[in-house]
Amino acid sequence: MTGTPSSLSPRLAAAYEPESFRSQGHALVDRLADHLQRCQQRALATSYPAPEPAKERAFWAERLAASDVSLEDLLQLTLERSNQLHDPRYMGHQVAVPMPSAALVGMLTDLLNNGQAIYEMGPSNAALEELLMAEIGEALGLPAGCGGILCHGGTIGNLVALLAAQRKWAPTTWAEGVAAAQPVAVFVSAQAHYCVDRAVRMLGWGEGALVQIPTDPHHRIRLDELERLADQARRAGRHPLAVVGSACTTSTGAFDPLEGMADWAEANGVWFHVDGAHGAPAAFSDTHRHLVAGIERADSIVMDFHKLCGLPALCTGVFYRSVGNSYLPFVQQAEYLWSNAAEPDWWDTGKRTLECTKRMLSTRLAAVRAEHGWSIWGELVDRLFATAATFAAEVEGRPGWELAMPPQANIVCFRPVDAAAGRKERLAALRQSYLCDGSGYIVATSFEGEPWLRCTFMNPLTETADFCQMLDELTQLLATPQFADK
């Protein structure tokens, strides 16, 4: 079929019209700046405005069915009904409170929409990624010659790093599959993030390949147990493939003894990987660098920039001690992208990532470097870790409250002292009541069979008064008939 394209419709012309975008953009920035101000002034009723799931679904079903919902309506409703991470009373999950300027970078990269499978799709990002991953890797302590790739999330990052470990040991698994290789063992803390277990299973090694190492009273991996269980795995015919250090654990914020794990890995010829998704930025703090001592000896490191680095999700770095190892995970022929799958072309990052299309992630990092420098990550770590320590002291000083353990990071587990039966259900009900009637947001966890409330301090604007208000509100709830009679 030949001929000219059909004429541009008025709606398509309007959708791409620059002046309309200009006015909408200015209005949106004003709206967001006002929202930031309200959050920082604690002017909202709560940092967690959502009702139960069924009610929220019914609300949006009704709005979607309406014919008069404008773009402005949608933006405002989304602002009002979403988690308010910039409210200092939000103390929930390990999600960054993004620096506002990062949202402006997102506007730029979303409009440009350069993918990054190959250089031609995203030239600026390919060059920035190669340079910045080496620079940040060296700042973490890795030697010259380090480097890596960016991806969307720590779950993908840990999977890719373990795939590199697998192919370093058994290169033929890419072609022949894992069934042709000796069974393996991957050693992790019993407190490790579930994504390591998921990665091992996705790699085809099965449930038995993951060996969980018991932890000490501070929830750090026990090196003596690592040695014992590694010997046991060898006797069972499993090859020790990798040992994974947590920096830090999700439930309690505990840092594994990375130096000792590095010694063990080196002595046994085992790949040493550090899941530093949350805590690796401690390396940028002079005060807290000791928590990750030994991370510089890792073969691979995962760090989420969308946690303690103040960037929007998702933006994860997979760092390798030797940048050459970043080419291990994948060997995929794709003539429509590159001519030779085996060539280590740094500019075609699709050769080294699980994803083909990737957002312009390195632009986000370059913006932090340009505006603040990497040292701002150390300042953020210092502030958030100090807030957690102050909160822990407040809990310890309040009658009727207890800590699970002194915090190492910005994660604090605590609960009311209660020896009664049904503590788990009672604690869950207390948290739910707080979400409904309180001013903030906290979460819950459990370890060693015991339930705890859990705060993760991610907002550098959180003050002592904010968490004291939270504790006061919880204490008031405990005095209500719902809890006092139990």
Image: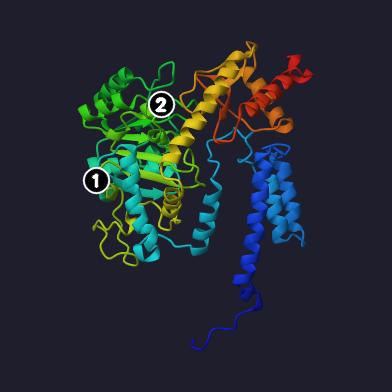
Q: Residue at x 66, y 44 (%)?
A: 37
> Residue 369 placed where, x, y %?
42, 48
For label 2, the SS is loop
Indicate whether 89 appears above or below 427. below
From the viewer's side, name the closer residue of 471 and 164: 471
From the viewer's side, name the closer residue of 352 and 122: 122
Indicate whether 358 appears above or below 136. below
* Left or right, 434 with reference to 302: right
Disc 2: which residue: 255
Q: Residue at x 61, y 19 (%)?
A: 415
Q: Residues within 10 Å of mark 2 (few under 14, many from 20)?
A: many
* Left or right, 152 with reference to 29: left
Disc 1: which residue: 145
Give the spatial CA distance, label 1 vs label 2. Answer: 26 Å
Q: Residues within 10 Å of mark 1 (few under 14, many from 20)?
A: some
> Residue 313 placed where, x, y %?
51, 46
| Upstream in sequence: badge 1 or badge 2 | 1
* Left or right, 58 with reference to 173: right
> Residue 335 placed where, x, y %?
31, 66
Q: Residue at x 73, y 56 (%)?
A: 73
Q: Quadrant of residue 70?
A: bottom right
**Circle 1 or circle 2, nearest the eye:** 1
Q: Residue at x 47, y 27 (%)?
A: 409
Please, what is the three-letter code of the amino acid marked with disc 1? Gly
Count of numbered tags: 2
Residue 99 can be seen in this image: yes
- Image quadrant holding the C terminus, namely top right
Q: Quadrant of residue 238?
A: top left
From the viewer's side, name the closer residue of 97 and 162: 97
